[in-house]
Amino acid sequence: MGLLFMIILVGFVFGLIFNHFLPLLFLKNKKLGALPRGSFGYIPLLGETLAFLNPHPSTTIGSFLQEHCSRYGKVFKSHLFFSPTIVSCDQELNYFILQNEDKLFECSYPKPIHGVLGKISMLVVVGDTHKRLRNVALSLVSTTKSKPDFLTHIEKTTLQILDSWKDKKQIIFCQEARKFTFNVIVKQVLGLTPEEPQTARILEDFLTFMRGLISFPLYIPGTPYANAVKARIRISASVKQIIKERRRNNNIIYNNNDDDICGNMNINSQKKGSDFLEILLGVDTLSEDEKVSFVLDALLGGYETTSILMAMVVHFVAKSPSALEQLKVEHECIRGKKKKGESLNWEDYKMMGFTQNVINEALRYGNIVKFVHRKALKDIKFKDYLIPAGWKVLPILSTVHLDPSIHSRPLEFHPWRWETQRQDQTGKKFTPFGGGSRCCPGSELARVEVAFFLHHLVQNFRWSVEDDDQPIAYPYVEFQRGLVLNLDHFAL
């Protein structure tokens, strides 16, 4: 019995090892070129995944990429996320991959991500489904970003957050930033305010959802991953209930329009077009489940990514007195042209040139998105390399942002570089939100929120940060201590 067990165990281990290296033995199109150099590692299935995911400051490329690029070059093969992989730290290949979405490559996030986000999340779907969802997102953003109601709400939320600091000497900024971005996005997407009971329930489930999204994908009751899947179901149910109530209220308004046209028009004007959901209800190209999934994607993008960007900006500016001083001058100039208490508008936002430089530099230097997941749809030749069909392909965005051959003094926070690099913001050198047809559609909304928050922050506070509190790539970016700010309040 013991011998049989040993034979089975040895056979199983041998099978794992053979399967691990199998992709190297059966390449069909060697005439297209040779595989890049590299290593699959020695751990079956996992390969080099653990080393690749080893945490490091997000302002560096990390020891794994440093060692592999030095040994194999900017393009190399590896075995990551249970798949044979081509890793690209090359500017030209990254651009080639991002610009050939659905032609030569397609989005290919690990299956556990699908389990949390849902199968029809815009982040994981491909082809026509992604195009439909993205077109709706772009339309919503373009009609929302400059609306006075949206801009006024951002500013109001900013002032509420800053007012809560007036008697504090120290805060955990990441907590404050997430509070700010959630209040903004839940209002913009669902029309809810922080005081409403539904908001508290959605936030509680959303925090559970976020913890599971970045956890080990083990679906056992009680684990963060399993809790996240259940939280997503509850959030979906909440959104469906809000949709049902919104439709019922709209029907009441329309049906009673003849009886009380003035009153009902006032009610309707408060709701109609005031948030993403109201507009989504009139979109015929999306199914009900797609609309619900779209809402969750909007909440996710508007909450986590924007709050981390805010934290990055505040962190880097704290360490650059000259950048802080120039920001202060820019925003005092804008405020000086307005009446006391007058709200910011879209024209004011377009005057925040140096603010945009600071945001760009925080995105480049801090690298909120380190890499994206793609898969080769066919055998592809790029230069002298073969990228086999079915292999995972990882364009590493951070390596281009921190490459000294592309950016002068890349390991310094230097916003003034963008005074001469504006033309490269959407080019090959700078891809903080991805690129091609999967570039983040809500990136402009994030910029507006950060800019408006900075407008009031730099005019009312000075702050310092702890030296050991820096952004760490896990690969998701998080501050080690939540970004502790020591505050000096001098106005408001």
Image: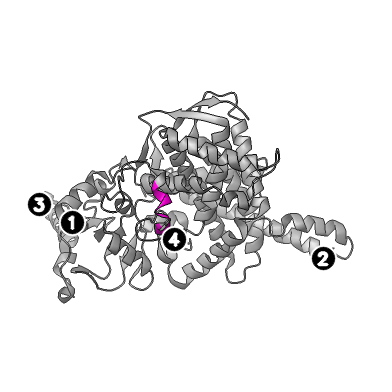
Magenta segment main secondary structure: helix
Q: Which residue is drawn at 19% across and 59% down?
A: 20
Amino acid type at circle 3 is Leu
Q: Which mark is residue 255?
A: 2
Q: Earlier in the sequence, mark 1 or mark 2?
A: 1
* Residue hosting label 3: 3
**Is there CB contact under 8 Å for labels 3 and 1?**
no
Q: Which of marks 4 and 3 is nearer the N terminus?
A: 3
**Numbered disc in front, either 4 or 3:** 4
**Is there CB contact under 8 Å for labels 1 and 2?**
no
Please give left or right for residue 67 compared with residue 224 in the image: left
**Numbered disc in front, either 3 or 1:** 1
Q: Residue at x 36, y 64 (%)?
A: 98
Question: Which corner quadrant holds the C terminus?
Answer: top right
Q: Residues within 10 Å of mark 2 (few under 14, many from 20)?
A: few
Gap in Å between the C-alphas at discs 4 and 2?
42 Å
Gap in Å between the C-alphas at discs 4 and 3?
56 Å
SS at badge 2: helix
**Is there CB contact under 8 Å for labels 4 and 3?**
no
Q: Residues within 10 Å of mark 1 (few under 14, many from 20)?
A: some
| Quarter where residue 458 is shown | top right
Question: Residue 63: x, y in percent?
Answer: 23, 44
SS at badge 3: helix
**Numbered disc in front, either 4 or 2:** 4
Q: Which of marks 4 and 2 is nearer the N terminus?
A: 2
* Residue hosting label 1: 73
Question: Residue 59: x, y in percent?
Answer: 33, 42
Q: How crowded is mark 4: few (under 14 residues within 10 Å), some or many (20 or more)?
A: some
The magenta-colored residue range is 417-424
**In the image, farthest residue toward the left:** 3
